[in-house]
Image: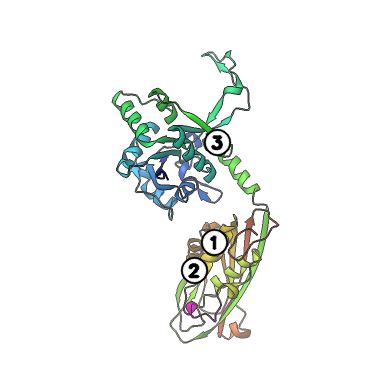
Amino acid sequence: MPKPERTAAILVAAGRGLRAGAGGPKQYRTIGGQTVIYRAMEAFSGHPDVFAVQPVVNPDDTALFDEAVAGLRHRPPTPGGATRQASVHAGLEALASEKPDIVLIHDAARPFVTAAVISRAIAAAGRTGAAIPVIPVTDTIKLTGDAGDVEATPERARLRIAQTPQAFRFDVILEAHRRAARDGRSDFTDDAALAEWAGLTVATFEGDAANMKLTTPEDFVREEARLASQLGDIRTGTGYDVHAFGDGDHVMICGVRVPHTKGFLAHSDGDVGLHALVDAILGALADGDIGSHFPPSEAKWKGASSDQFLKYAVERVTARGGRIANLEVTLICERPKIGPLRDTMRAKIAEISGVHVSRVAVKATTSERLGFTGREEGIAATASATVRLPWDDKGWDDKGRSA
C-alpha cells in the first residue's frame, strides 16, 4: 500500500483589502455571524487529510487574528510580505521543516470553500503535481486597448475563472518561489502563474461557484443576503425557571456572580437566567427541555456551572446549520437589584453563546411585593430565543444530526 500523502495548507491573510471599503481588513469582518477568516480556515482545520494549517498574517493584525479564529487548529502564524507572492513564500518557508508532500494555498478572503473542493485539490495535486480549481466563464469576455476599444473576443469555451485552494507538490512550488525571489520576480498574481513561469504544467479540476473571493462592499452585501436566504425557518422559543433562596453569600444570575445575603437551593448553580435561556433555545429547536438533557437526578450535574448548559444549547443550533438571532431574559425579583449589572450580564451571555451583545437583552422587574418573589423567597426568570435554521422537514436525532 502506498504511503499516504501528507498535506498542509497555507491561508494567505496578510492583505489590507482596501477595495472592500471601511471596516478594517476584510478577512476579519463578519459575514453570516462569523469572521471571514474563520469560515475560510475552518474547512481546512477540520479536514481529515490536512495535517497542518499555516496562516500568514500582517504582524499588525495578531490580536485580530487570534480573536477571529479562536478554537481552530492551526500552526503559529507567520508574518506576511508586501505582496501576496511574498506572503505565500513566507508560508512555504514556515512549513519547510514539516516536510509536507502537498501544499494547498488558499486566500483567506474566500470563506465559502468546501471540504469537497479541498479533497479534489489534494487528489489533483497527487496526480499532476500542480492543479487549480476553475469554473467556466458564462459571460462573453472582451479584450480592450488603452482607449477602451474592443480589440478581440476570446473563445469563451476555453476560458476559465481560477480559484483557490491551488495545490502543488510542496518541494516543487517551494523551489519555484525561491527561484522567483532570486530572479527578482514579484509580479505574479497567483501561484499558478508563478508555476507556469517556472515551467510546470498546471492542471485544472472542478471548482465551486460559491467559492468566491470577497473583494468589494457589494460582495459582502450579496453574500449576507444569500446566507440569510438559506435560513428561512425562523423559530421562537420561550423558557421559564425559578429557584428558591437558601443559605449562601451570592447567587449566579446570567453567568455573573452576584453578592447577596442568600444563595440558591438548586442541583446545579441555580442560574435562573441561563436556565430559562437554555429552555428557550431548546424550545425553538423542538428539542426537549433542560431537564431532559441535564437530568437533576444525575450526580455529575450537582453544582455544575450553567454556562456549559447554554453552550450546549447553542451547539445544538450550530449543528443544524442555524444561527441565533436574539436572546432575551427577564428576571423577576425584589433583590438583588439587576439594573446596575444589566450590561455585565448581557456581555456574559454574549460571551458564552457567541452571539453579539447587540442581540442580547436582559430586563428586570419586581412583583410589587406579591407572591414568593415579592416575599423574597426566590427568583424567577422568563426568556425567549429567536433562531434561524435552514428549512428542513426531515427532522433531527438526539445528536443534532439530520434524520
Q: Earlier in the sequence, mark 2 or mark 1?
A: 2
- How dense is the environment of label 3, judged by Cα within 10 Å: few (below 14), some, or many (20 and up)? many
Find disc 1 in the rendering and name its residue: 315
Q: Nearer the viewer, mark 1 or mark 3?
A: 3
Q: Is residue 331 visible?
A: no
Quadrant of residue 61 within the rendered picture: top left
Does the magenta segment cover residue 172?
Answer: no
Q: Amino acid under label 2?
A: Gln
Which comes sooner in the sequence, label 3 or label 2? 3
Residue occupied by mark 2 = 308
Q: Nearer the viewer, residue 98 or 288?
A: 98
Q: Secondary structure at mark 2?
A: helix
Q: Could you say which disc has been placed on residue 274 in the image?
A: none
Check disc 3 and report the residue beneath it: 207
Q: Residue at image x 53%, y 66%? A: 312
Residues at discs 1 and 3 in contact (Cβ within 8 Å): no
